[in-house]
Image (cartoon, rainbow, N blue to C red):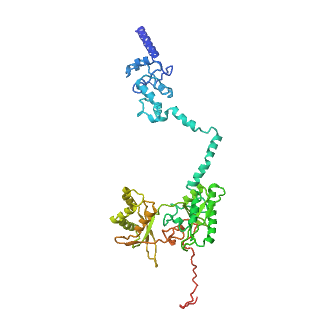
Amino acid sequence: MNTPTTSATMKDLSSVKTANISARPSPMGTRQPLPRHQRSGSQFFPPNVLTNEGDTSTEIASTPSTPSPTPRNTTPPISAPELITTPVTTPKTSLSPTIDMEDETFPTPPSHSPPCPPPVANDEVMTDHSPPSTSQTSVPPKKNTPAPSTEEDLLRAHLAVAETNRSIIRSNGVNSLTVIPQFTPVPQGGFPHIHLAHAAQLFDFQAAKVITAWLKVPHPKILIRVFDHDGKNPSVKGPILVERLRRAITEIAHFIHQDEQKVKVSPPCPEANCVETDRPLSFLAYNISEETKTLILNQRIWSSTDISFAAHQFSVNSPPLLLFCLHGFSTTDTNTVKSAVHDTWTEDVTRWDIGDILSECEIPEENVHIAAWEFINSLWVERLDFKASGGISLPRYNVFAVSPTSNPTVWTKLRAYLHSLTYPSELEGSGTAVNFIPCPLCHSIAHPRGLCPFPNVPLWNGPKHNANPRPSNTNMRGRGRGRRTPA
């Protein structure tokens, strides 16, 4: 038996192990080997990753660039869990070129982040490679917006912005326009649009001194048109409508502010020498808050059992979309009429005239051709179901387009030119422009009273199609010379 020789050999090996361990101390202190030897080696950790702090000369000389399998069998390796449990915030000092690149990269601000992550196979280090990795960059925001320390501070912080949040909810909320029970709620898709004859129609037939006085009234203020108001007997109807409007707007303002608002309403006033048929219809509502103005204009149409009105901005609106109304076609297909109008507008002569008119406005000369085509392509048509006696259909068609200019003179000239044209179709006759029939109910020029869409709105509280229906009595007999029959 070779027992002494074997014993001497084991002692020599133990001495070698002790010397190697002393030359390579663990960065975590006393080495705690674990039985997970299969996770050690160069296939799991790149070279120079286990550097020692302060012993740089020994580390560079003793650590090979590519560890061979032989030292793994002779010297027990430092297990992988020891490196994983190393805190990431502990700064590492190493003279190895690879590790120096990593240490200089991590403190770099987010705007100078490295193009690729460092080649360290550590989950914590890879996670900290993102911009918010350093604690220094996250400290200043926390100091600028400190979190409330107590429940009282948190409550006070919310109460400080409560009024702003209430204003946002009431002015822009989904249900804010439908919660006042005395008014008709907004239907799905919104209220029908009211088309004006021109951009300043809201000031038509108003006395010049009244317009001047209205301009001097400070904002916020709005213009109002009352449904089914014809402007007759202003000395009698005027005070009544003013008081009803004031009460309605006060109720809307009370819904927002929960307190009394001294709303004021100014009635229309015609010129002294005006024609009987030229009557102003707009009222001015003022001395209201910005929130009340926003709510009224957002809903636009307000209808209660006492009064129904439409609200408008106190400003000159953009040119109307409705250009003219056509009749003479023998079809009910709007696409056929649209094709006839489009073909007429795109003819060389017509397109040249449109561009010549638009060249008189603020549009640059090099963009006039594009503006003319954009105007033509914005065309659309809507049908009005007029009927003659006997139920014969005589449809009319409203023609709409988006004006490329806000110049009132140029727009009026363009509209008059298109109004004078004839619009032939291939098989369905020829259309010519006809005068509008304004609606006395909503004051839109797009339809007559009998085709007004507002009485068809669900839960409509305002006036109906027939203002004064005739009473029908089948027992009434005439007193003429016609044949009389016993009742």
Q: Position of residue 113 (x, y in %)?
A: 44, 34
Residue 411, located in which quarter of the rendered image?
bottom left
Q: Is residue 168 visible?
A: yes
| Left or right of 72 on screen, residue 476 | right
Q: Position of residue 279 (x, y in %)?
A: 55, 70
Q: From this viewpoint, which residue is outermost toward the left? A: 348
- The foreground one among 99 and 172 is 172
Identify whether 193 is placed above or below 55. below
| Left or right of 224 on screen, residue 346 | left
How many badges with numbers are in the image? 0
**Residue at the spot x=59%, y=52% of the render?**
167
Q: Position of residue 58 (x, y in %)?
A: 43, 17
- The foreground one among 17 and 413 is 413
Q: Position of residue 467 (x, y in %)?
A: 56, 73
| Left or right of 45 on screen, residue 252 | right
Residue 326, located in which quarter of the rendered image?
bottom left
Identify whether 12 is placed above or below 245. above
**Residue at the spot x=61%, y=39% of the render?**
148
Q: Is residue 1 visible?
A: no
Identify whether 32 is placed above or below 419. above
For the C terminus, which image quadrant? bottom right
- The foreground one among 405 and 308 is 405
Q: From this viewpoint, which residue is outermost toward the right? A: 260
Residue 328, located in which quarter of the rendered image?
bottom left
For the N terminus, which image quadrant? top left
